[in-house]
Image (cartoon, grey):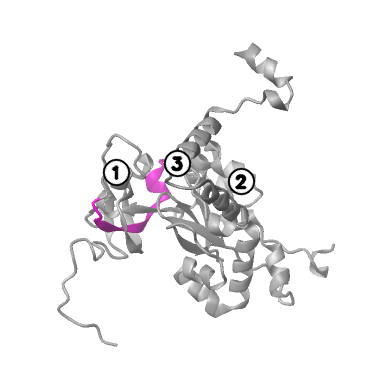
């Protein structure tokens, strides 16, 4: 069936990133337990998969501040060699991890 | 401190002193019941749910994916929905991504922040999965960790480490070993181990004449 046009989605309802997009993980150090491990903060990555359905921001929820606004998680991939200088292994080895949309920003194409 | 421990070590079971987290767990449980947020029955029931989950469930999922290509496709598309087809319920809000091992990719699962694990399909994680050496080293030197499990991955095979941190859990779909064409689905499931579904070892088959010297 063809999609019905002219439906306006609410803010955050549609994923902001698509598979293949280049992103950078935010560098923030808020107080509390945030489920973005330190070792990936500031790293550039490629979106591998959009995790459906959108989810409550569990970091807000953890502090009792769940306003009900949902966003997507993304499975992102980062080459191991970009994470660890002197990584012992194949250059194609990579790490995949899910990150909530609020921690990702768009990144320009790889400059090498 | 040492003297204190010593005194209890030689005591009988009635001298048992619970640890910090055990006391905290009891206190939280009692408070929740006292405030009527949940009933004691619900705690008991949830423990029963958790105890009913074992790696045998995951093994059945893997074996079914090996023999039924259409199921395998659905499993890779939406792990949770495919498991639910087989009657495996998900009692929490976690999703499940099934990661397929191939000749080109070997998947390994870890939770660096704590011990996230696909409990609905595998039950409780092994102790080493929860300890810091595995959690740190699986992401920094996965090939060395795998080698310690006896798993040597050739350099032209990509290692893909999945760090579970939020709402999705991961289950590795291991490669079906050679020589298993004649096995039934049940026999195949018996070959699939918990460790293979975490990705630290392959599934092995030594059951026929091919393995004799």
Check the image and report above or below for B203 versus A63: below
Q: Position of residue B13 (x, y in %)?
A: 72, 27
Q: Which residue is mark 1?
A: A64
Q: Position of residue A96 (x, y in %)?
A: 42, 54
Q: Residues within 10 Å of mark 3 (few under 14, many from 20)?
A: some
Q: Is residue B153 visible?
A: no
Residue at figure coordinates x 74%, y 77% from the top left: B182
Magenta-colored span: A67-85
Q: Is residue B20 left or right of residue A24?
A: right
Which secondary structure lies at badge 1? loop
Which secondary structure lies at badge 3? helix
Q: Tell me the distance, in whole angstroms, between the alpha carbons under discs 2 and 1.
A: 32 Å
Which secondary structure lies at badge 2? loop
Q: Earlier in the sequence, mark 3 or mark 2?
A: 3
- Of discs 3 and 2, which sits in the foreground? 3
Does the magenta run of residues contain B34?
Answer: no
Q: Tell me the distance, in whole angstroms, between the alpha carbons under discs 1 and 3.
A: 18 Å
Q: Which mark is residue B213?
A: none
Residue at figure coordinates x 64%, y 68% from the top left: B176
Q: Which residue is mark 2?
A: B126
> Disc count in the image?
3
Q: Residues within 10 Å of mark 1 (few under 14, many from 20)?
A: few
Q: Is residue B73 left or right of residue B203?
A: left
Q: Which mark is residue B32?
A: 3
Q: Chain of mark 1?
A: A
The C terminus of chain B is located in which quarter? bottom right
Q: Is residue B37 visible?
A: yes
């Amino acid at each position: 069936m063809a999609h019905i046009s002219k439906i306006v989605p609410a803010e955050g309802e549609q994923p902001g990133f698509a598979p293949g997009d280049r992103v950078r993980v935010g560098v923030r150090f808020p107080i509390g337990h945030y489920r973005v491990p330190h070792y990936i903060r500031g790293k550039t990555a490629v979106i591998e998969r959009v995790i459906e359905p959108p989810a409550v921001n569990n970091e807000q929820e953890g502090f009792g501040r769940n306003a009900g606004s949902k966003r997507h998680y993304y499975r992102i991939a980062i080459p191991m060699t970009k994470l660890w200088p002197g990584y012992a292994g194949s250059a194609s080895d990579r790490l995949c991890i899910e990150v909530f949309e609020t921690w990702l920003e768009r990144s320009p194409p790889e400059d090498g | 401190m040492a003297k204190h421990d010593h005194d209890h070590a030689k005591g009988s079971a009635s001298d048992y002193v619970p640890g910090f987290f055990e006391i905290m767990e009891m206190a939280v449980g009692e408070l929740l019941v006292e405030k009527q947020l949940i009933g004691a029955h619900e705690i008991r029931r949830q423990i029963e749910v958790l105890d009913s989950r074992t790696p045998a469930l995951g093994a059945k999922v893997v074996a079914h994916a090996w023999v039924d290509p259409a199921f395998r496709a659905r499993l890779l598309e939406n792990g949770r929905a495919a498991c639910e087809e087989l009657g495996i319920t998900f009692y929490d809000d976690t999703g499940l991504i099934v990661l397929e091992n191939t000749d080109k990719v070997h998947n390994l699962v870890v939770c660096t922040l704590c011990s996230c694990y696909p409990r609905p399909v595998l039950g409780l994680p092994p102790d080493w999965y929860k300890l810091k050496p595995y959690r740190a080293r699986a992401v920094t030197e996965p090939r060395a960790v795998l080698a310690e499990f006896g798993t040597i991955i050739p350099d032209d095979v990509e290692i893909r480490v999945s760090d579970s941190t939020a709402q999705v859990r991961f289950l590795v779909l291991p490669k079906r070993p050679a020589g298993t064409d004649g096995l039934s689905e049940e026999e195949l499931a018996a070959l699939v181990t918990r460790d293979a579904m975490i990705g630290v070892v392959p599934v092995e088959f030594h059951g026929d004449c091919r393995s004799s010297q």
